[in-house]
Image (cartoon, rainbow, N blue to C red):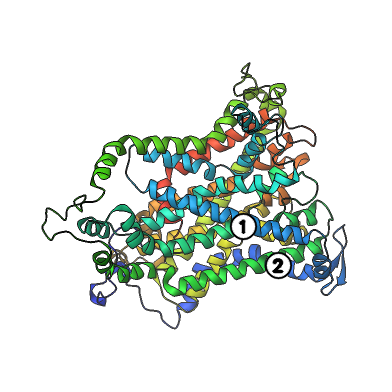
Amino acid sequence: MTTAGEIPDAGRTRAAVPALARRPRSSTGSVVRSLPWLSPSLLLIAAVILAPIVIMVRSSLTRIDSAGVSHGFAGLANYRSLFAEPALGQVIGNTVTWVLAVVAGSMVIALGLAQFLNRDFFGRRLVRWALIVPWAAALVMSSTVWRFILQGSNGLLNRVLMDLGLTSRPVGWYQDPRYALLSVIVVGIIVTIPFTTYVILAGLQTVPQDVYEAARMDGAGSLRTYSAITFPLLRPSLVIATILVVISVFNSFPVIWVITGSNTGNASDTTITWAYKIAFRQQLDVGEAAALSVVNVVFLCAVIAVYFRAVERGLGGGRVGRALARALAPVGARLRAAVPRRSTTGRDRRPGRDGTGSAAGRSWRRVRRFAMPLFGLLIGLFFLAPYLVMFVSSFKSGTELFASPATYLPSHWEWGNWVDIWDKIDLAGFLENSVIISVVATALVLLVSAPAAYFTARFRFPGRSGFMRLVLVTQVIAPVSVVVGLYQEFVSVGGVNEYWSIILTNAAFNLAFSIWILSGQFESVPVDIEEAAKLDGLGPFRTMVRIALPLVRPGLVTAVVFSFIQVWNEFPVSLTLFNDPTAGRQTLPVGIQQFVGLTQTEYQYLFVASLVAIVPVVVLFASIEKHLVGGLTAGAVR
């Protein structure tokens, strides 16, 4: 991966390319040699990702009753039933509105926020940590606190708006069909901003600082520098970021499901949540749900095709470095044409000596020291606010939580809530299940991904490009988009509510990130080091274990922590495949939903359990924050 360091010169000769870029040449037996290294990954992907897709396609062409019994070939009957659904038009409209609004809103805000966080100021690390809290926290838990904030007469948002005189009576933000979609869109933008910001931030850090120095020497101001240098060089990352965010938002399930899933009708449903309702909540029609899921996967495949086209055009892969190198050449000319020079003397060419805006520049330099940390503080408080509400509300009584109007602070701090939670639900059992599944699935991810990443980084062989593309496909197909096929597959083999099924599923869908980031790390290890190990008699596997793995420890830590957090926070698949309360088979995100009732929700206990789940992963996420900037776009910029 190209990072914020020296950008390779597109015209550099082969002899000048550093040793880390040279790999052993492929041979006729390279395909056979690759099998022991790649087979575990291929088997896991085939069994847990590709097989459910095939099962969904088959089910979409089969007549299946509400009990799940197949009654033979149905042709396109399920698709005809789907397209005849009265709610289809509304759901498609919701989906388009949801994706466009959340992607556009989060991209615009994240672009400015990434620029801000790319500057050096006091407290920047703390602001970044505040920004990752909504990202590290499970979406189901973040959505729960937003549901509480958006309630009608006893919601905090209504209390704030009425106190400010902006409204005279409470509004049922997510209960009222007129505002339900708008409510989840706003929440969707807020929880998507952190991921989008870090993807763009990764792109910003690939822009060489030398170019900015040249711009300052030419007297270019901030706006001119941004329009002539930053944005053109950032455009490849923006294309990649937009595609990744489209995929992420389209696959989003918890925000809509938790906030408006209990509402009647389909006022805020997208094709993802509607497919789940058709299969498991409303019609119980697996065939029709499979047909809609196939349509969803086809859309994802179309987005993936656009992504591949972007990569092939040099907007991704290792070509980013070459694209930047080619882009650097005309920068000076463009700046010279864009920025008028008053003099060729060194005195007049210093920054701030162009005769315009110098007073403003000097004023900004005086206030910048205080203004940027203050602005950073406001940003941090904004993203932390929902979790501060969660923390304070965990000390309220059930009666006070539903007081109208809502109270800001508890009238009496109920410290016992943090003790009573352990008796209210089997919180210890949920924690145990989540730890077992997360640890074993993460270990399996590392065990399977490390050999595949090492071999693809070190050897050129027929099928390498195809393998890496397959890995990328698994990265953009979310489990929820194939959950109907997953459920059918594991029902047929007795895997529902079994540890091994949920572990395999989580491992398969987290392989991609680990393979991409480890492959980039292995590529950064000079081949000469490994050549010396081979002279000592070490084979490829022992070389990987004894030489390469210790050298890529930061990448290993990032892959392990990121995979652990993803498994720990997973919700829709666990809700479907590992959800048997009588046998104690529930993960923490699923188990704490017991506090969500049809008529009343025990938010005080729900928030206590959520904080117990959130705090450890936020600490882990913060520990790898500096590595995430590089790792996020590993799959896009190789």
Q: Quadrant of the C terminus?
A: bottom left
* Residue 495 x, y percent position in the rendering: 73, 55
Q: Nearer the viewer, residue 521 or 375?
A: 375
* Label 1 environment density (alpha carbons within 10 Å; few <14, some 14–19, many ≥20): many
Query: Which quadrant of the structure image shows residue 98?
Result: bottom right
User: The residue under label 2 is which amino acid type?
Assistant: Val
Q: Residue furthest top?
A: 412
List the residue tagged with mark 2: 295
Report how far apart the C-alphas of labels 2 and 1 lie in the structure: 16 Å
Q: What numbered label is drawn on residue 349?
A: none
Above or below — where is 281 with respect to 55? above
Q: Nearer the viewer, residue 606 or 396?
A: 396
Choose the circle earlier in sequence order: 2 or 1.
1
Front tag of 2 and 1: 1
* Residue 610 x, y percent position in the rendering: 61, 35
Query: Which quadrant of the structure image shows residue 359?
Result: top left
* SS class, disc 2: helix
* Residue 248 x, y percent position in the rendering: 58, 56
User: The residue under label 1 is which amino acid type?
Assistant: Val
Is the C-beta separation of discs 2 and 1 under 8 Å? no
List the residue tagged with mark 1: 99
Which residue corresponds to the image point at 60% horizontal and 48% vertical from the top-left? 188
* Label 2 environment density (alpha carbons within 10 Å; few <14, some 14–19, many ≥20): some
* SS class, disc 1: helix
Q: Is residue 543 visible?
A: no
Query: Which quadrant of the structure image shows residue 489?
Result: bottom right
Q: Is residue 313 visible?
A: yes
